[in-house]
Image (cartoon, rainbow, N blue to C red):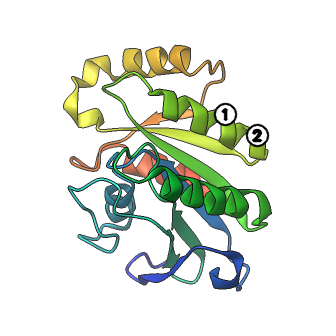
Amino acid sequence: MNLHNSKFEISAVGPKQYPNNNLPEIVLAGKSNVGKSSFINTLLNRKNLARTSSEPGKTRQINFYNIDSTFYFVDLPGYGYSKMSHQEQEKVGKFIEEYLFSRKEIELIVQIIDIRHKPTENDILMLNFIKSTGIPYIIIANKADKIAITKVDSYIEDLKKELNINLDNIIFPFSSERKIYTETVWNILRRYLN
């Protein structure tokens, strides 16, 4: 797989706009500004294939990134963004739900959360929603570079308790900033792509 051969393909708000080439999809979910775009850029070793913004709530559509015509990274709009009107939140929520429940190509959902903070109510709601789809999922605990490397494991254990997860190999640390853990994450993703 040639990661340099990656491109943004389309923003969609409904099934008619989704790509129709049957490639597997890895879906990224997370609250606004948690680092979904940085996660994509780090894994692909690109500066700004996925546009990052310091302003939360920028992504209002489902963005499809074609990775060497092998699979898609699919970036969902961030949740929990308070400045979006209630009506807008509802609209975005509906097309996310429609996508997650109708899309056969989804192989894995990756929920990205901030390792430094307790999961928010929205993180927990999203996780329960992800579980309800029956699609395999993992959790990426981003911003691991912001805590001492010796404390990462205990933070992961705390997150497991907070999120009521009693399985191993579900939560993985990550750092877009320092690019550590990248190889581990790729090994996990490849398992779902094969």
Relative to 92, 180 lies left or right: left
Image mark for residue 132: 2
Distance of label 1 from label 2 (alpha carbons): 6 Å
Residue 104, located in which quarter of the rendered image?
A: bottom right
Q: Where is residue 150 in the image (x, y as percent from the top left)?
A: 27, 18
Q: Position of residue 134 (x, y in %)?
A: 79, 44
Image mark for residue 128: 1
Q: If the image is split into quadrants, where does the C terminus sit? A: bottom right
Instruction: Give above or below for 167 relative to 143.
Output: above
Q: Which of 187 and 144 is in front in this view?
A: 144
Instruction: Give above or below for 168 relative to 62.
Output: above
For the image, the number of numbered tags is 2
Q: Where is residue 61 in the image (x, y as percent from the top left)?
A: 49, 69
Q: Which residue is painted at 34% across and 70% down in the image? A: 50
Q: Please say if the residues under marks 1 and 2 sit with CB atoms less than 8 Å apart.
A: yes
Q: Which residue is painted at 47% across and 59% down in the image? A: 77
Amino acid at pointer 2: Ser
Relative to 15, 79 lies left or right: left
Image mark for residue 26: none
Instruction: Give above or below for 119 relative to 67.
Output: above
How crowded is the residue under tag 2: few (<14 C-alpha within 10 Å), some, or many (20+)?
A: few
How crowded is the residue under tag 1: few (<14 C-alpha within 10 Å), some, or many (20+)?
A: few
Q: Determine if residue 93 is in view.
A: yes
Q: Nearer the viewer, residue 74 or 31?
A: 31
Q: Where is residue 140 in the image (x, y as percent from the top left)?
A: 46, 40
Amino acid at pointer 1: Asn
Q: Nearer the viewer, residue 13 or 102?
A: 13
Q: Which of 33 and 1 is in front in this view?
A: 33
Q: Determine if residue 19 is in view.
A: no
Q: Which residue is painted at 64% across and 44% down in the image? A: 137
